[in-house]
Amino acid sequence: MDFSGGKRKKLKLGGDQRNACYPHSLQFYLKPPTENISLMEFENLAIDRVKLLKAVEHLGVSYVKGSEQYQSKLEAEIRKVKFSYRENLENEYEARRRDHISHFILRLAYCQSEDLRRWFIQQEMDLLRFRFTLLPRDKIQDFLKDSHLQFEAISDEEKTLREKDIFASSPSLSGAVLELVYKIPFADALDLFRGRKVYLEGGFAYVPLKDIVAIILNEFRTKLSKALALTARSLPAVQSDERLQPLLKHLSHSYTGQDYSTQGNVGKIALDQIDSLSIKSFPPCMRQLHKALRENHHLRHGGRMQYGLFLKGIGLTLEQALQFWKQEFIRGKMDPDKFDKGYSYNIRHSFGKEGKRTDYTPFSCMKIILNNPPGQGDYHGCPFRHSDPELLKQKLQSYKISPAGINQILDLVKGTHYQVACQKYFEMTHNVDDCGFSLNHPNQFFIESQKILNGGKDIKKESVQPETSQPKPSVQKTKDASSALASLNSSLEVDMEGLEDYFSD
């Protein structure tokens, strides 16, 4: 893809040629674009793609993916930026072309670090899932073939022969009619096999249409992950172009969400407040870490990293952090000298005072959910993602969540909507119908909780009252889901205006 300062000469393609370039409204982005485009179009496409992916992220943590509200609102967002989404719309060439080029532009911006790649892959997967649900049944086989996926739908005779076994092995088919079934090599259906959700025979998995999207998304993730790694290797050549380097840097650094590394409340949290705050304002992932630390007087490395960076993000200074961890570990019969030699360095390192002097940022929800799952004896991770459902239910009961509320949360967890489940927990523990924001970070949970408990004011350093004397907050019912999304879109537009101003300077 070449860039020029002048106007781009549009390719003059006939109808058949256009259809051959982009036969479907969705794609695996296997071939990069080869045409020349202007720098102005490059910038505009980049901005529109970021707008769309941010909307995908916000909707994904505000609504259940695949629900009617989610589908309709995401369709509206795609229409705004004029990208492709439906198969049978007329004059789709330009929309599909914009979608194709903009995806590869953002590969350049989001290949530069693990966090950026993770964020980009997740949003692109959600976008592909949405588009696949709109793909007509008669187009699915052509799409699979064009995407180099060797998945063939079995014949009606073969389907009838195995119908009983397929129904018994596929929970997603409960009460449904068996339509298309795909015969897939066993190795490509490991996720379904691991969850005991697929029928196996002779080294092949027989996957119903309802479940095929999970396999397609897994293939897409693998291919995109490899492509981003290759892009990162060739990035120095692109960054040597002084026209593109600042643009790509600004794109990648500004729009994956707040990292909560710089806080105006540093030093405003007293150590004797942490026990009370853990009950009132910590998300479940941090609440369980704090409880485990108080009970065992020790946390393994994964727990110390997740909880330590969270405490740093809510305002603990380096001196407070050293005091907090040392006091707790000594209660576990650890020798003070052993702590100073074995643990204080790691705490100073996380504050950027040792080693490479990297000032580490608190973990986001996505990083906690996708990275470093807890093992036996660990307490880090996301309770909604990593806890056994029965243990999670007991934990929610101990948090005084109502039985109806627990059922709602467990239903969301069953559907793998972990962040939405955590958001529901926030609403129930803070007595609001709708929290009015999309939850994507534990430190965001804490900040929004403190705003509610303090009447919208910043965190105040004050002596801690016993929990029993704290009245249950009476909060005016917040905006409904649509107005919450409107506020999110408003803030996103402000962000994008800043990005557009940056590019126009």
Image (cartoon, rainbow, N blue to C red):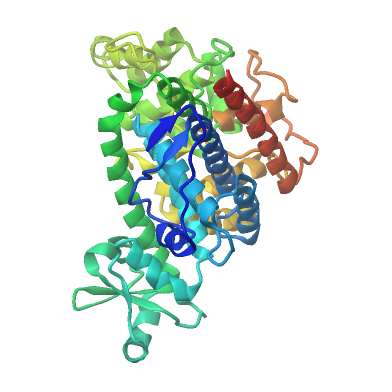
Left or right: residue 190 versus residue 163 is left
Along the line of sight, which residue is nearer the eye, 57 or 144? 144
Q: Residue at x 53, y 27 (%)?
A: 258
Along the line of sight, which residue is nearer the eye, 187 or 334? 187
Is residue 227 visible in the rendered structure shown here? yes
Is residue 415 visible in the rendered structure shown here? no
The C terminus lies in which quarter of the figure?
A: top right
Q: Residue at x 54, y 59 (%)?
A: 411
How many tags in the picture? 0
Q: Residue at x 52, y 35 (%)?
A: 41
Return the x and y of residue 232 as percentages of the image width and height.
29, 32
367 shown above or below 219: above
Left or right: residue 17 versus residue 433 is left
Return the x and y of residue 362 as percentages of the image width and height.
44, 26
Q: Quadrant of residue 212?
A: bottom left
Q: Residue at x 39, y 15 (%)?
A: 359
Residue at the limit of the structure toward the left, as seen here: 202
Return the x and y of residue 454 as percentages of the image width and height.
71, 24
Return the x and y of residue 60 as percentages of the image width and height.
55, 48
278 shown above or below 228: above
Along the line of sight, which residue is nearer the eye, 484 or 236? 236
